[in-house]
Amino acid sequence: MKYHPDHNNGDALSEIVFSEVAEAYTVLSNASSRKNYNSQRYHTAISEYAKPSQTINELLVKATDLKIKIEKADPFRLNRDALLYFIRQLFPSNINALLRTDANKQKEFLETILWCSQLLSSNQTKNLVQLMLPLFKQHHWMLSKFENIIKEQTKRERWEKYKVALAFIIALVLCLLIFLITKTSS
């Protein structure tokens, strides 16, 4: 239900996740289709595991596509869990393999990830930073940029948490001032 289109109007990332979940449910809920799926997986597993990981160019294209989708999305309706999911999917299982790729493409890829992560919550960004720790050895600048993003996200979250209480206190103080002014002038 978290990714259902009725709960995420117009969020392209949630729609993609929901369609993948719906497809998996369709296959796994039917005994014969589940058996066929398992059989196919068994026969294709060897060739799948032998496939090389994605190149930095492919990762950069996917990261850029994600950035474009985010730019077009409504930031107030963006599903941040889906965004974190898609960002995490961009990283290969062996993250150290990224360190052995073209340095300029690496930097461009990481800058795109950095841009995309700005819409996450501070906890989600911290989670992402943990995933990316091996990359910070070669890209020291990234850690400080992520720390700045986390500080901004924390400020934004604190503001969102306390803005109603602050408005209430300000309104209460103004009412008290008006009361005192009218009482002293009478």
Image: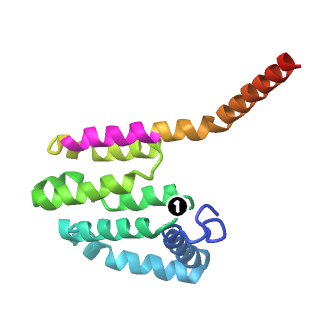
What's drawn in magenta, residue-wise? 141-153
Task: Decide which of 36, 163 is in the foreground and name it.
Answer: 163
Residue type of the residue flagged with mark 1: Leu
Q: Residue at x 25, y 76 (%)?
A: 47
**Would you call the spot at circle 1 few (<14 residues within 10 Å), some (14-19), or many (20 or more)?**
many
Residue 139 shows up from this direction: yes
Q: Is residue 94 visible?
A: no
Residue 149: percent from left, percent from top: 37, 43
Q: Is residue 13 a member of the stretch shown in magenta?
A: no
Q: Position of residue 16 (x, y in %)?
A: 49, 72
Tell me the quadrant of the picture where the N terminus can be found: bottom right
Residue sitting at x 56%, y 72%: 10
The number of callouts visible is 1
Residue 103: image quadrant is: bottom left
Element assignment for label 1: loop
Picture quarter containing residue 9? bottom right
Classified by dominant secondary structure, the portion drawn in magenta counts as helix
In depth, the one of 81 and 54 nearer the eye is 81
Which residue is pictured at 53% across the width and 72% down the height? 15
The vertical placement of 74 against 130, above or below, is below
Residue of label 1? 78
In the picture, measured across the screen, residue 28 lies left or right of residue 150, that is: right
Percent coordinates x, y for residue 91 in the rendering: 29, 58
Between 168 and 2, the one lying in front of the other is 168
